[in-house]
Image (cartoon, rainbow, N blue to C red):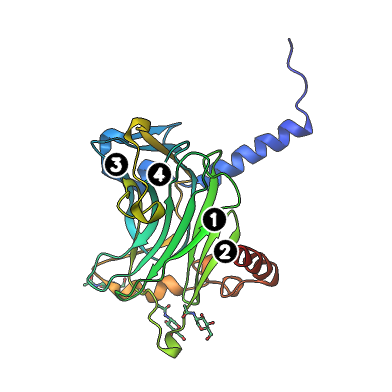
Amino acid sequence: MGFPLPSIFEFVLLSWGLASCRGSGGSFDANYDITWGSNNVVSSNRGREVQLSMDQSSGSGFGSKLSYGSGFFHLRIKLPDKDSAGVVTAFYLTSHSGRHDELDFEFLGNREGKPYTLQTNVFSNGQGNREQRLRLWFDPTADFHTYKILWNQHQIVFYVDNIPIRVFKNNTSIGVNYPTQPLQIEVSLWDGDSWATDGGQTKTDWSHAPFKAYFQGFNIDGCPADTQNHSNTEQCYSSSDYWWNRNKFWKLDSNQQKAYRDVRNKM
Ligand SMILES: *[C@@H]1O[C@H](CO)[C@@H](O)[C@H](O)[C@H]1NC(C)=O
Ligand SMILES: *[C@@H]1O[C@H](CO)[C@@H](O)[C@H](O)[C@H]1NC(C)=O
Ligand SMILES: *[C@@H]1O[C@H](CO)[C@@H](O)[C@H](O)[C@H]1NC(C)=O
């Protein structure tokens, strides 16, 4: 078979390929380190996909090398399938000082055929207890979906495939603490069967181990912040240096508000 002339379709594919290379801005190794359970971490496709697994001996995890002072963080995730009761897949941002700041996505596994619950939480200045739970409207084990956290001076927004599912406003003007400290990205797969599924009554069934979660999208849209020296924090709020600080990201636009209301009405 000969090679036909490149069609417009192939041209589009080629440009798309180049664009996605440009956009990928870093493999797993460039931006992340394995943090625990290294025997249960497998990287493939030249660092473009990582698999975490959990067996009875250990879960596993990875974290960003740097901490950030603002950003629009994302990962593509495919969750452990079949019977995942008790298994927690977490993607979160956390500070490392005493006054804890943290932004969490936690995916709570379930018995086969029962839906996953997505839990989000926000800690600011040590105060948490802001858990919210949502049933996903698709099967998160069947394919990769994009989970994102926007964090700028004005708002924190959790997104599932571009749909805002939670907004945490900067309400410091009315006395609500807002995360201020450099945050590091952490990802982990661990046994949460003391609480995660049916309030801890449904336990991990180890006969289904190892449990596996898959991750892609390791470029990081964040403003690197020095954890020792907070004097560059202000710079992380600059809208000329960092696009996620621009007006467009200060609040949801009308389409996003509508999508947000629709999701919230189903919660
Ligand atoms: C929260 O908003 C106030 C203005 O109301 C601003 O001065 C402050 O820097 C913001 N806080 C953070 C952590 O972005
Ligand atoms: C911020 O204030 C608005 C208006 O009072 C309120 O609706 C919202 O729930 C508050 N958000 C937070 C995170 O405190
Ligand atoms: C802290 O960061 C600022 C701005 O980046 C820099 O000018 C200053 O020298 C740093 N201070 C220390 C103690 O490293």
Amino acid residing under circle 4: Ala
Amino acid residing under circle 2: Met
Tags 4 and 3 in contact by the CB under 8 Å rule?
Answer: no
Where does the image place residue 59, in percent across and percent down from the top left? 29, 41
CA separation in Å, label 2 and label 1:
7 Å
Q: Earlier in the sequence, mark 2 or mark 1?
A: 1
Q: Which label number is shown at residue 135?
A: 1
Q: Badge 2 is on which residue? A: 267
Q: Earlier in the sequence, mark 4 or mark 2?
A: 4
Label 2: few (<14), some or many (≥20) within 10 Å? Answer: few
Residue sticking out furthest to the front:
201
| Total count of labels | 4
Amino acid residing under circle 3: Gly
Label 4: few (<14), some or many (≥20) within 10 Å? Answer: many
Is there any visible trace of residue 74 in the rendered image?
no
Is there any visible trace of residue 11 in the rendered image?
yes
Q: Earlier in the sequence, mark 3 or mark 2?
A: 3
Q: Earlier in the sequence, mark 4 or mark 1?
A: 4
CA separation in Å, label 4 and label 2:
21 Å
Tags 4 and 1 in contact by the CB under 8 Å rule?
Answer: no
Where does the image place residue 142, in percent across and percent down from the top left? 55, 38
Of the residues tagged 3 and 2, which is closer to the observer? 2
Tags 2 and 1 in contact by the CB under 8 Å rule?
Answer: yes
Q: Which label number is shown at residue 85?
A: 4
